[in-house]
Image (tube, helix red, strand yellow):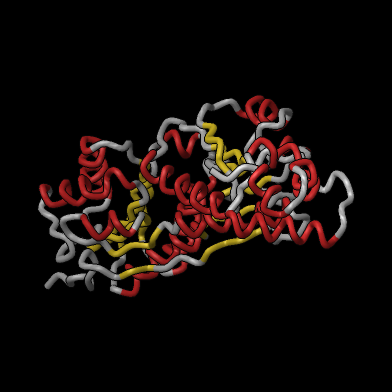
Amino acid sequence: MVKITDVARHAGVSPSTVSYALSGKRPISEETRQRVEASIRRLGYRPHAGARALASNRSNVLALVVPLRAGIHVPVVMRFAVSVVTAARRHDHDVLLLTQEEGEEGLRRVADTALVDALIVMDVQLHDPRLPLLRTLDRPSVLIGFPSRPAGLTCIDLDFKAAGELCVERLAGLGHRVVALVGSPPEVYVRGTAFAQRVVEGFTAAADRNGLVSLVHPCDASPAAARRVAEQLLREQPGLTGVVVHNEPVLEPLIDAFGQLGLRVPVDLSVTAICPDELAENVRVPVTSVTLPSSEVGARAVELLMRKLAGADVPEATLLAPRLTERASTAPRTLNP
């Protein structure tokens, strides 16, 4: 490992001069600074993280706040987390993952120390109690999610309302007249989780716009719950021929449950979903879906944060347009003879 003394020897200066060149705490001549920088590049020297933090008054650490609450699908959350970590490393930053449900207290505890330079906040609620504090912190933040009143915040996410609309428009375009949304677990809606509520808004708006009969049912994340919801939907609307699923763990169990109840996908029932492509592609019947762009959202959240740390202006709202991929689970509605 290259040390500061190696750089000093190569550049023909003292170790303290190298330190001053890195920190800028004392003036040195331009010629000396350029010689030191050339030696750093030639030797591949990387300052110790602690030294960099002292020199810049920064920790080079970002906090990713993602409370693992009931009803959250952890594998999807981890996709976002990995994308944030990967993007942060490209900017020479590490990530501190905060998973406890501590609300404002946890944010304040981290922000009041020198642990992190900035925060990325996930699992945003429509009326999130953390927002007043985030607006007043002296550390920049980016939200992955949109509260009901995002003014004064920097938010990025998939346009979940448009995603719900896009799924319904596809079903309506195939002639389906009775559609249902099988949504997230009930506790997700009770909390007012923003992305789940936006999907319901989009689903309902598109169904009404197309004159469709529509139903919305939350569903616990288990095969047994999927079976109960499938039975309930068919009791309430025997003419059901189109389903939108926004609940990753029950996608395949739900298709199986409808099959056990006599509905074949896509002959009798067309299914669309909002989920990662890898899941949609590997279900027994590959599912027409709007992808969750976790890699893009995470990377762009980090980019926004880096720009804020550099003092640059950033847009308050970044909504990613949904992209629907057609697969084997959707087909035109079969008309009864």
Q: Would you say residue 247 is visible in this rendering?
A: yes
Residue under the image location 55 percent in, 40 percent down: 95
Residue under the image location 78 percent in, 55 percent down: 311
89 or 23: nearer the viewer: 23
Rendered image quadrant of residue 224: top left
Q: How many marks?
A: 0
Q: Position of residue 266 (x, y in %)?
A: 18, 64
Q: Is residue 79 left or right of residue 194?
A: left
Q: Which corner quadrant holds the C terminus?
A: bottom left
Q: Is residue 298 left or right of residue 171?
A: right
Residue under the image location 36 percent in, 42 percent down: 75
Say if 20 sits above or below 174 in the image. above
Residue under the image location 54 percent in, 39 percent down: 192
Q: Position of residue 98 (x, y in %)?
A: 54, 32
281 or 93: nearer the viewer: 93
Q: Position of residue 55 (x, y in %)?
A: 76, 41
213 or 62: nearer the viewer: 62
Rendered image quadrant of residue 135: top right
Say if 254 sits above or below 336 in the image. above
Q: Position of residue 76 (x, y in %)?
A: 39, 46
Q: Would you say residue 135 is visible in this rendering?
A: no
